[in-house]
Amino acid sequence: MFNKYDSLISNMESPVPSNRGKTNGVLIGIIAVVVVVVIVGSFIGLDYKNLFPSKTTSTTPSVGKTVFVYSGPSGPSNANHLLGGCVIGVMKGGATPVASEQLMAYLLNPYVQQGCEAATGFIPVDTGAFSSSPSHSVPTLYKATNASVTVDYYNSLTTSDEPYVSSVISTFMTDYPNIHVVVSFIAATDIINEVKSLEASHSTENVVMTIDNIDIGTLFYDGYLYNLTSSASAITAGAGEIASVTSLNNYETHVFGGIYFMTQLVNIPLVWINYSAMQKAGITTAPTTDAQLLTDAKTLYNYYGQGMINFQGHGGASTPTEVYQWMVQFGGNPMVFNDTGDVAAMDYLLNLSQYFSPDYTSSYWHTISGLPSNTYTIMDYQWPGSVNVTALGMTPYNSSDTVINASFNAIQSGVFIRDPVSWLSQWQFYMDNAWISIIEEHASLSQVPSILGAQNAALWSYLNTTISPAYGLQYENGLYQPIEA
């Protein structure tokens, strides 16, 4: 077992900051820690600039189960990476929004973020959380002399994450005795329905929600979110957010006219490699550009006699999400399918697909099992939450080759989230159609523009008919696009 978190977690006094202004407050310990992502190594003393050696070392492994994980090759236009995970927001109309903001500030604190990473696998969005001694300080927004209030907190994380969240909230209420928090662990769709119901009844309840970054769009476009613009800097005061995440929050003002939600819990897709299998084929460094990836794919194909690049080609939400990342990295706007960058990305994927592993048609969020058996050598862009390399019997190449390092590197390179429009599932349906026509049915390069153009027309027709012609026109004019920083 190479996971160094065991000793770190067992010695951790508390998953949350100590009481404000106190040096001897009693800390509430972690109720339970369920490590969803098996982190390869420790996040103490990060070395994110050296994820890969520049050349083969003298200890080249002879077995086929040495794994590398990194942020992937850079596209021709940029190296920004898709953020998954949850955002945090407040329902509008609450009687005491500053109390809700106090809870937000607490949940975004570096110490809470570090504990959350250890307990749930979500990557911190705070640079201070990557320190061995993250700050316990939380900005005071709701004073101890203020009246007692209740805040309803809705959280869409999985049941395995509930103990940690409950422990955080319990300590929060110890530190802020005049803010009583009622926690509800419910699905994102149920959060949406609950907020809609409260708004319909003109409720003045204080509601904070941790919800999937895609589902927040329904609440924003329906006008149910509180505008955090004037308080955003106070909420994150002293938090030390990673610059790209701060830029992402700020860019909301350009897209939505204000800051209505903030990035809280991050998952970021990474590239996973059976490195010893690559070495057998004569490849000693991970591909850092798309051109190099294509060259390595051909080398692996020639050596092993089949395609060795795996892809989330299962369909449903998996494939469109991965294609979305590729299109953005080629400078495209995947929401419209067919601008220049979109076409270039799909041209590239069509060329790469001749080297796809046969497994790609069944691969989706949780697929990684073919890596140790080398039915494929490279798993392109898989979410860390889906990968348990220990269970697969794999070992890391070196101590800096870790999920946390690779994720930190990716986040610092630049990030984006999908525009959380309420019709994203319809977009996914049409992107699936494009994928099937281009990749599975082996279209020619000359057919790619017309296939993508057909999906653009289909989505425009859908929006034009189901919403309004004006909305369809906004779509065609490129109003809807990735939120990128």
Image: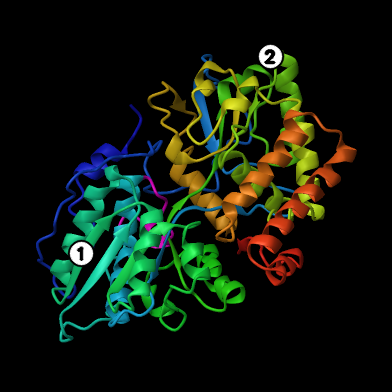
Drawn side of residue 296 relative to residue 97, left or right: right
Q: Give the label on residue 304, or none.
A: 2
In the image, the segment drawn in magenta is 121-133
Mark 2: amino acid:
Tyr
Mark 2, Cα crowd under 10 Å, few <14 / some 14-19 / many 20+, is some
Residue in the foreground of this view, choosing between 474 and 325: 474
150 relative to 6, above or below: below
Specify the amino acid type for callout 1. Answer: Val
- Left or right of 267? Residue 329 is right
Badge 2 vs badge 1, beta-carbon distance below 8 Å: no
Residue that carries the numbered disc 1 in the rendered image = 182
x and y percentages locating residue 16 in the rendered image = 23, 59
Q: Nearer the viewer, residue 197 or 300?
A: 197
User: Of helix, strand and loop, which mostly describes the magenta segment?
Assistant: loop
Secondary element under disc 1, as helix, strand or loop, is: strand
Q: 480 above or below 61?
A: below
